[in-house]
Structure formats: structure tokens, C-alpha cells
Image (cartoon, coloured by chain):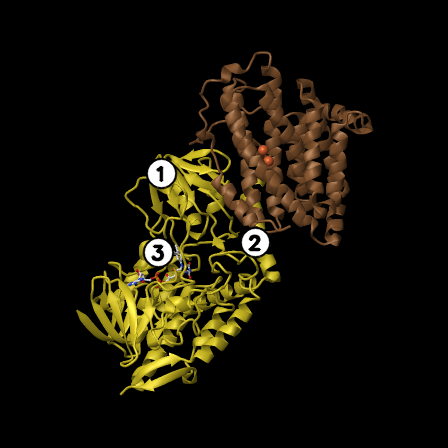
Chain colours: A yellow, B brown
Amino acid sequence: MNTTTGVLVIGAGFSGLGTAIRLSQAGITDFVICERAGDVGGTWRDNTYPGAGCDVPSLVYSYSFAPNPNWSRAYSGGAEILAYIRHMTDQFGLRERIRFNTDITRLVYDDDTGTWTASTKDGHTITARAVVSAVGALANASYPGIDGLDTYRGHTMLSSAWDHSYDFTGKHVAVIGTGASAVQIVPELVAMAATVKVFQRTPGWVLPKANPHHPSWLTELFRRVPTTQTALRQALFYGHEAMALGVVWDSAVTTLLQQVSRRYLRRAVADPWLRRRLTPDYRMGCKRILITSDYYPALQAPNCKLITWPIYALSANGIRTAEGIEHQVDCVVFATGFDVYNAGTPFPISGSGGRVLGDEWLAGAKAYKSVAVAGYPNLFFTLGPNSGPGHNSLLVYSEAQIDYIVQAISLIRRDGLRSLEVRKDVQEEFNRDLQRRLARTTWNSGCSSWYLTGDGFNATMYPGFATQYARGLATLDPDDYLATKAG
Amino acid sequence: MAHDFDTMLRTIKDKQWSLADVDWDAPGAETITDEQRPKLKQFMADLVWIENIGAMGFAALADKAPTETIKQIYKYFHAEEQKHANAELALMKRWGMLDDGETPEPTVQVKMAIWVLDNFSDDMPLTGLATLIPMLECALDGALVKFLLDEVSDPVCHEVFRHINSDESRHIAVDFQVLDVVGAGPVRRQLIESAAVLKPQVLLGLIVVFVPLLNKMRDNIVAMGLSEQKLYNAVKRFVSNGDRSANTRRIPAYQMFKQQARMVIDRTHPYHRFLADPLVKLTNAFPARLLGKPPSWSKELTHEPVDR
Ligand SMILES: Cc1cc2nc3c(=O)[nH]c(=O)nc-3n(C[C@H](O)[C@H](O)[C@H](O)COP(=O)(O)OP(=O)(O)OC[C@H]3O[C@@H](n4cnc5c(N)ncnc54)[C@H](O)[C@@H]3O)c2cc1C
Ligand SMILES: [Fe+2]
Ligand SMILES: [Fe+2]
């Protein structure tokens, strides 16, 4: 079966839904959203592990065009964020526009008609003038390649596919990984399980999280005078913007933030050996900063232990580490993070003249303003190459992308274009400048992280302030594009 | 000389073993005689603590490693030295020298070494540590282990030390490769780093702690019947390995430790009469409680192959 539509939006997470909302508000209503899962929410539908939550305040980690006065606290939990996404979906009447359980497996461009045809896993096709790929930046999490994984007889789970039917009470549990998800999971498990062993490879920089409940008068104020919410959102936004000085570039501010983090560590952890093992050996900002006040206390609970010996294998009953001991556990939780799409594409995309995007991106993804790619007309990405912040809400970036994309699609429709394609020279100049600026950032300062490809190419992060990024995307300059008329 | 540290790291990962791989109840424990037991117990206890000190040495090196791969290698070596200590504790347990969960009490010299490592290893420059460790590995591990295997016929002990020796061959190879890399660095940096070894608190720590530690162990094992020739061979190995590389020969710290190693094995050298012996006496009388609580890393040893 083939469907034809004006705009195909792939993905019903924050970005896909946001795109649909802004398209509607711009009067573009012939769109279809395809979502491979059975519900909206993306990341927040999948990450339901105990303790899941955002680490940027909710007032900033939400869309300005869909304000929510009801956030219960500064940093909301995952359930509340998912509820916000569901509410947003219903509020803008999007649910009936979504084709759930529809997994896009391929995109092919037709030069003659200037349209894209998407294939779905169950054999249907959808043809659209424009496509917005809002599939998220994080690929599906998978089990890491540890020797003997298949010989382990206990229970295993991924942080991003939590098994809520498993009862941790009285269990001996291992958590592998100490990143953003792990620091949220560990305190919860320590409260539930008999023992928790946390296996760390590299410690992260930790900053304490003050997470006050929003008092009822504040919620009331937000409802009555929405501008107050906007004002606080702005204040929080600029507070995070200032962090860029320390996170994006290695500067005096970085040193200052590291001092704050070290002082917090000194206060929170009494034992010097534990402290030493928790002290990072790279500049702050090079990897994602961990915002938590519960993690260090949990690690020091009597039923919790931090293991820093390298893991070399899983055996039938547990984890074997290089100090020669087998750590026997009932359950292993993998909080080992995600694969990011910094090279290749999530599904095959063949563009103008049959060129394959995955091949072009093999050495590292490149786009224009993270949204458009030369050779792939009428195709737009959210959270595309080099759109990641280390210091601020991803949704601020996503919102800027969405509005830019809506401008592009509006242009196609207004001028009745067959194709709108970013100029190759414009894209190349943009990337030359981008990589020049990236070279001066902390991420490219020699530490290895998932921000970089195997060869050290940075296709993930944006080297600057969110304000700067948003300004760059505020108006679409038609001169950057090649437009061909239909007919 | 180009060294392939990536391949080395891969080999290290491939060669991992676990205490659980060993059948600690296999026959052979009865081969230890009552006459051997008390001296062997002291010997093993010293060995365990030397491994533990070596472990911490590698932990300190990991923080100063010149490349990410070498850092990873050192992290494994840190763990492997801990594994050696754990395995040796398991042997002691098997031989009826330990109660459940017991770790032997370290000598006062070991306690002091732990204290110095805990407090000063961060001040120790890479070159100093990188030279000290191969000396300990060659002289002590090499000689001690060979001696032990001559004395003890328990097949489980031999099995365990086949693993340990295989690990040690990689430790020593990397030790000298890193020295070669460090020695190839600019002379100016070496002078600065060597000057750091000579900082009073570091030098004093090294002398007061390692001189008596080495001497006491040396005398203990010689008293147990280790021939001085074996010790001599071990040091010769250190020197011939080190001298093979022109880069290593340029490292002042290497030259310094080389001299010290020579003095340690030669019992007639005035070093013993004037420095080492008096320091052993002095440290024997040192009240260990002045060192405060032992650091928590020194309490992580275990003879249990599995932990739940
Ligand atoms: C635990 C956790 C905490 C986080 N906290 C923060 C935070 O505090 N601040 C912040 O800025 N960011 C945070 N993030 C990042 C977060 O991922 C983004 O902020 C945001 O949720 C991304 O939304 P998205 O819609 O772009 O992508 P996603 O949420 O990943 O949504 C993509 C959607 O596309 C669907 N899809 C994918 N491929 C296909 C296909 N082939 N066909 C059909 N559908 C497809 C997926 O099923 C999914 O529903 C966090 C992430 C995690 C995992
Ligand atoms: Fe050893
Ligand atoms: Fe060793």
C-alpha cells in the first residue's frame, strides 16, 4: 500500500512532535508521523528505569511553544516528562496523525518528481515532498561486547529497556557503567536491593543537583501570569548558557567548575582512596557532566561498593575482574550508554542520483546547520550533525531546528518547488568553519568520548552557545539553497 | 625502538585469569612440612605485601602514563598485582596459615612503605616510579618466586605461579619499554623529573622506607636459604634489560636505582653497614601507630575467589 502526503515526519519523540506542532501552526497540515513504537515519547518512553529524570531544569527542558505551568519540581522525573509529551500530543491533536508501529527502513529520492519514498518494515510505502527525520541522536542501546555475556545465567537488563517485572528486593545486583543513567539508577537500587556493586571504568565530573519542589504559589503564579514562567525560563536558560564558558571551551571557568566539583567530592566522600577513584583525569566538559546529589551518598551506603578493577568477562554466576575475583550477582544492569549516530545513518538513505548518505557519512556526519545535506533535497534532520550542547537543554536546539525546517518547507510550498537543496559549497564552508571552531573546544582536547568518532572527528557537538546556534538558524537564507521549480 | 603497546594491551586482556580457575582443594597442600610452615608464612606474607605495594605503584603510574594505551595497561597491571596478592593469600589459606577472612599483618617496614606510597606517590615523577618498579619486579618477584618454587612442591602453587609468571613477563617487558620511551624524551624534562625525585621529602621517604624494606626482605630470604647468586642474577636481569636501551641509560633515576640494586645484593658493600642495617634497626623500633589508620586500599585484599 502506498500513501502520499506533503510532509513525512519520522519519529514521535520530542523532536517529531515539535515539528508537527510547528508545521500545523504554520498552516501546513498534510503531514504524517511514523513512529516505530506503539506510543509517543521516544527517549522518555524507553528510559523508565527507577530514578530517570532530566538534568536540565524542566522549565528549560520543555518547548517554549508548549509551556507547562505544572512542573512539580525543578528537575522532573521521567514519568512527568513523558506525561508532558503525551499531554502535548493530545493538546495539539496529533495522536490521530501518528502511524504507530511503523518502522521506516529506507528512504529513496526520486530526482524526476522531487519526492521521497519511504519503505516501512511491514512492506508499505509513503511518498512525500519533504521528509523530516526526527529519529533521535541516540541509537538503540545494546549490550556491550563483554566476553562470556551469553554464559551468564543470572538476570540482565539495559537501563533503557527496564524490566519492571523484576523484583530487586533482597537481590545482589551489579551496575555496569557510571554515566548519566547509572548515577540516577544506583541510588534507587541501593535503597531496594541487598547489595549493589557499581563497576566503573572512568569516573565523571559530578556537580550537586538542587532539586526543590515547585511551591504551589509558584505554580499558581505561572498559571495566572504566564510571563513569569517565561522570565524564569529565560533566567535558567542564561544560567546554563554561562556554563558553556566552562564546558565548551577549556578556560578559567572550566578550572573553576572543576574546583566546585572537587570541593563537593571532598565534602561528600570521606575516604581518600574512594575519592581518588572518583576523581576524573580529564578536563570537565570533555564528557557529559553528571548532575546529582544522591550518587556519592549511595556509593558509600553499607550495601554498596564501587569496583574499579577492569571487567574482563562474565561467567555463569557473575562478573570477573582483573584482580582475580568473581563478583557473583543475581542481576546485571547495563547502564553503558548508547551508540550515537556520529557516523552512518539509522537506515539507508539514497539521495539525488542514487548517492548513499551512509557512505558519505562513514568518516563522520556532516550537514549544513545540522539540518540539511547537499545531495539530499527536501530532507531535513532534527538533532543532526553537530547540534549537541554539553551545557544546555537539547530542546532549545531542537526548537531552533524545527523552526528552520518549517521555514524551508513553507518556502517549498509557497514557491511550488520541486526541490530545495543546500548548496555544496555553502555546506563545505560551514563545516570548515565549524571544525576550526571545534578544534578549540574541550571535546577535541585529546580526551576520548562518545562525542567523537573512532578517528577523533567531532560530528556531534556544537562549538558555542545555544544562543549562537539558535541565531544561526533563525532565518533561512534562500541564497544558501538551490531551488528547482516543479513542472 | 618502536613498541606496540596496543597489541600488548590486547594480549593482556586475552590472558586474564581468575582465582576461581584454580582448584584450591586439590591434593598437594600436605606437602608443606611443619618445619617449613612458620618461615614460609613470613615469606608469603612479605610477598603478598610487596605485590600490594607494586599494585599501588602501578595505580600511581596509571595517573602519569604518557599515553591512553599505556594508562590502560597500567590499570590492568594494578589489578594483576592485586590478583597476585589475592592468589598468594589463597595459597596461604590453603596451607593453613590464615583464618577465614584473615590478612597477614604487614611488617612495620611494609606499613611505612604503604604510608609513603599513599602520601607521596603523587609527588613522584613518572621516571622515578617507572624505574623503581622494574627494579622491584626483577629483583624481588624474580628471585623470590624462583626460590619459592624450588622450596615448595605443591602442584597448586606451581599452577598459580605459572599464571603469575606469565603476567610478570608482560609487566617486565612493558616496564622496560616505557623506560625506553621516557628515556627518549627531552633531556631537560628528565633533569626536572630527576630533580623531583631528589626533593627532600621524596628522597627521604624512599631512603627511609625502601632501603630497610629491601634489606629486611633480602636478609629474611637469604636466611631461608635463597642463594645470593639468585639475587645477583635478578639484579643482573634488571641492569642488562635497562642497559640494552640507550634511552633508558640516559635516565638519571635509572642510574641511581641501578647503583642501589648493586649495593643491596653485595652484602660486603659499606651501604649495608652504614645505611641499610641501621635503618632496619631503627624502623623495627618505629611505632607503627604513628602512621595512623592504614589506607583503605590496603584492606581490599582477599583470599576468597568469589565475592557476593
Ligand atoms: C535518560 C536520559 C536523560 C536525558 N536527559 C536530558 C536532559 O536532561 N536534557 C537534555 O537536553 N537532553 C536529555 N536527554 C537527551 C534526550 O534524548 C533528548 O533531549 C530528547 O528526548 C530527544 O528527542 P528526539 O525526539 O529528538 O529523539 P527520541 O526521543 O530518541 O525520539 C525518536 C523517536 O523516533 C523513533 N524512531 C527511530 N527510528 C525510527 C524509524 N526508523 N522509524 C520510525 N520511528 C523511528 C523512536 O522510536 C523514537 O520514538 C536525555 C536522554 C536520556 C536517555
Ligand atoms: Fe606480581
Ligand atoms: Fe609485576
Give me the C-alpha separation between circle 1 and circle 3: 22 Å
Question: Mark 2 vs mark 3: which is more N-terminal?
Answer: 3
Residue indicated by mark 3: A140
- Closest to the camera, between mark 1 and mark 3, is 1
Ligand 2 position by quadrant: top right
Query: Residue A152 shows which numbered tag?
Result: 1
B201 to the left or right of A95: right
Residue A328 x %, y %: 40, 34
**Image quarter of the N terminus of chain A:** bottom left
- Closest to the camera, between mark 2 and mark 3, is 3
A317 is higher (above) or lower (below) than A231: above
Q: Secondary structure at mark 1?
A: loop
A196 is higher (above) or lower (below) than A44: above
Give the quadrant of residue B171: top right
Question: Mark 2 vs mark 1: which is more N-terminal?
Answer: 1
A448 to the left or right of B283: left
2 and 1 marks in contact (CB < 8 Å): no
Residue A136 x %, y %: 36, 63
Q: Amino acid at mark 1?
A: Tyr
- Closest to the camera, between mark 2 and mark 1, is 1
The residue carrying pointer 3 sits among few (fewer than 14), some (14 to 19) or many (20 or more) residues within 10 Å by Cα, namely some
Asked if residue A3 shows in the view, the reply is yes
Question: Mark 1 vs mark 3: which is more N-terminal?
Answer: 3
Q: Residue at x 41, y 59 (%)?
A: A340
